[in-house]
Image: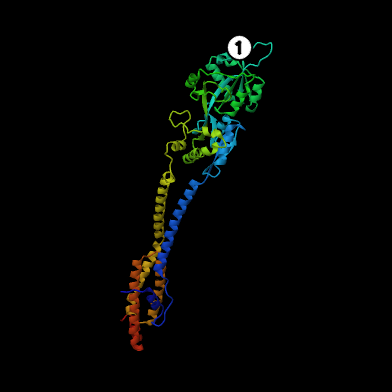
């Protein structure tokens, strides 16, 4: 049986077949279109959420790095790195401090994300290693005595124990170098109270050495440090060359103080002819580290470490000190524990975007699915009353179908026809809103067609009866006799 709601709706508005009433909206098509729009909107929302999450995860991060003092090689290197990182996913914002101690404190106080610190100083508990910036060696030497006519030169100093009673100059203003000198003296059997220690700013050290303001000198820095090389060159006078003092207790110092390592100064490390020193000299070394806060994102630290070693070669052309940058010690017993992000880069276990966020994406999709199911149930619950009301209207239509078969009044049939029109409109609205499904609409369609047929048949019968017989039949029905 072919059912057509448009035809039925037209028949419900008029009695005759020649008049066509307003057509009903394409309910099924509207419902499908609405469903399509809702589905598309849901997909776009999911895609938008994923795109937003990707942008949030991949947006550039700016890290504050504490470094100092002013005009130091460390500060210049960090500034060079900051310029090189200007267009990368991780960027640097240098925070100038008074030195490694102040930088470490800035990291401990949460004012910085990264810091350049000395490994032989107290390391904040929240610090984790990201890279070894450079290794430093302690250089201890004695300047040749100036020749004075008529005055006999004093005994030549060739070993650290002979420094007792002399004046020792320390290059740089940091207290850490003074503490380093005292450690060396004590381990070598010299009471630090029996020597006079003076400090010279790095920029004034060469001039102070030329003026013989001390008998021996200590500098701490990279083997290729220009400050140390200039200070040693200033010690050369009257054809004499400085005497380098070997730290024979280097192994003992390293054993008692793990922040230090026994090391050697290569022959000719500071240039000159003959090379200075002429032979390898035993000494101790310590490192400067780039450290990060313990709570700093693993992915951000991994990205920073990757950028640092990727750009190192480029920076070396402008700043040779960058060649000294090394990966951190990833051993569990390292002096400064490595940051998980840096360890992931070193070990080749750096996570991709999907590795880091796959769980969030999965649970997000599950949550969206659950929300969709809950929304569908809630929408169905809200439409429960509408479905119930439409069901009662359908029952009403069936009742009118029975009445139409026995009605004796065209006026009554017209009233039922008008009521059927209202029921039809309500049913179409319910279908468009999704309150009833296609099966319910088909059942209503059948009942509506049967009603129209009953009305048409009854009207045809009444029209064929004489008017007197119609009135009599109505009177008998009114009195209950028929």
**Figure check: 121 above or below 418:** above
> Going by the image, does 411 lie left or right of 191?
left
Identify the image quadrant of residue 457: bottom left
- Residue 224: percent from the left, percent from the top? 56, 28
**Figure check: 21 above or below 131:** below
Give 296 or 473, whichever is nearer the viewer.
Answer: 296
Give 339 or 422, whichever is nearer the viewer.
Answer: 339
The residue that mark 1 highlights is 155
Identify the residue at horizontal 60%, vertical 33% (top origin): 97
**Figure check: 461 above or below 100:** below
Whether residue 398 is visible, yes or no, is no
Identify the residue at horizontal 43%, vertical 59% (top origin): 40
Packing grade of label 1 (10 A; few <14, some 14-19, many >=20) is: few
Give 361 or 417, whichever is nearer the viewer.
Answer: 361
Identify the residue at horizontal 39%, vertical 60% (top origin): 380
**Figure check: 213 above or below 2:** above
- Residue 384: percent from the left, percent from the top? 39, 62
- Residue 255: percent from the left, percent from the top? 47, 21
- Residue 7: percent from the left, percent from the top? 38, 76
Q: Among all residues in the image, which is located at the extreme front? A: 273
């Amino acid at each position: 049986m072919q059912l057509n709601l448009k035809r039925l709706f037209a028949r419900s508005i008029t009695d005759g077949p020649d008049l066509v009433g307003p057509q009903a909206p394409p309910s099924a098509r509207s419902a499908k279109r609405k469903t399509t729009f809702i589905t598309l909107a849901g997909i776009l929302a999911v895609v938008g959420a994923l795109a937003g999450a990707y942008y949030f995860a991949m947006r550039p991060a700016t890290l504050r790095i504490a470094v100092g003092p002013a005009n130091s090689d460390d500060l210049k290197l960090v500034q060079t790195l900051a310029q090189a990182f200007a267009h990368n996913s991780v960027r640097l914002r240098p925070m100038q401090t008074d030195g490694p101690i102040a930088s470490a404190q800035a990291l401990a106080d949460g004012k910085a994300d990264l810091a350049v610190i000395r490994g032989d100083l107290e390391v904040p508990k929240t610090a984790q290693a990201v890279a070894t910036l450079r290794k430093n060696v302690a250089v201890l030497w004695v300047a040749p005595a100036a020749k004075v006519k008529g005055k006999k030169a004093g005994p030549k100093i060739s070993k650290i124990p002979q420094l007792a009673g002399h004046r020792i100059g320390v290059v740089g203003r940091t207290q850490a170098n003074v503490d380093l000198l005292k450690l060396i003296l004590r381990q070598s059997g010299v009471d630090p109270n029996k020597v006079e220690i003076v400090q010279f700013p790095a920029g004034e050290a060469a001039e102070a050495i030329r003026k013989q303001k001390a008998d021996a000198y200590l500098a701490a820095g990279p083997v290729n440090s220009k400050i140390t090389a200039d200070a040693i060159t200033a010690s050369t006078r009257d054809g004499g060359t400085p005497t380098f003092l070997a730290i024979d207790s280097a192994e003992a110092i390293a054993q008692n103080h793990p922040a230090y390592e026994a090391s050697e100064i290569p022959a000719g490390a500071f240039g000159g002819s003959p090379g200075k020193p002429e032979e390898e000299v035993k000494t101790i070394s310590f490192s400067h580290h780039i450290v990060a806060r313990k709570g700093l994102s693993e992915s951000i630290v991994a990205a920073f470490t990757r950028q640092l070693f990727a750009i190192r070669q480029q920076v070396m052309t402008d700043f040779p000190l960058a060649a000294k940058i090394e990966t951190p010690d990833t051993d569990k017993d390292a002096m400064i524990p490595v940051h998980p992000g840096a360890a992931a880069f070193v070990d080749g276990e750096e996570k991709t975007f999907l590795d880091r966020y796959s769980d969030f994406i999965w649970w997000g999709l599950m949550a969206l699915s659950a929300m969709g199911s809950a929304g569908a149930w809630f929408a169905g619950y809200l439409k429960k009353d509408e479905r119930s009301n439409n069901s009662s209207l359908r029952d009403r239509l069936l009742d009118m179908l029975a009445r139409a078969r026995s009605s004796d009044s065209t006026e009554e049939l017209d009233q039922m026809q008008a009521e059927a029109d209202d029921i039809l409109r309500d049913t179409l609205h319910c279908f468009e809103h999704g309150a009833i499904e296609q099966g319910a609409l088909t059942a209503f369609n059948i009942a509506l067609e049967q009603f129209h047929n009953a009305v048409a048949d009854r009207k045809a019968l009444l029209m064929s009866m004489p008017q007197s017989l119609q009135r009599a039949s109505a009177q008998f029905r009114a009195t209950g006799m028929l």
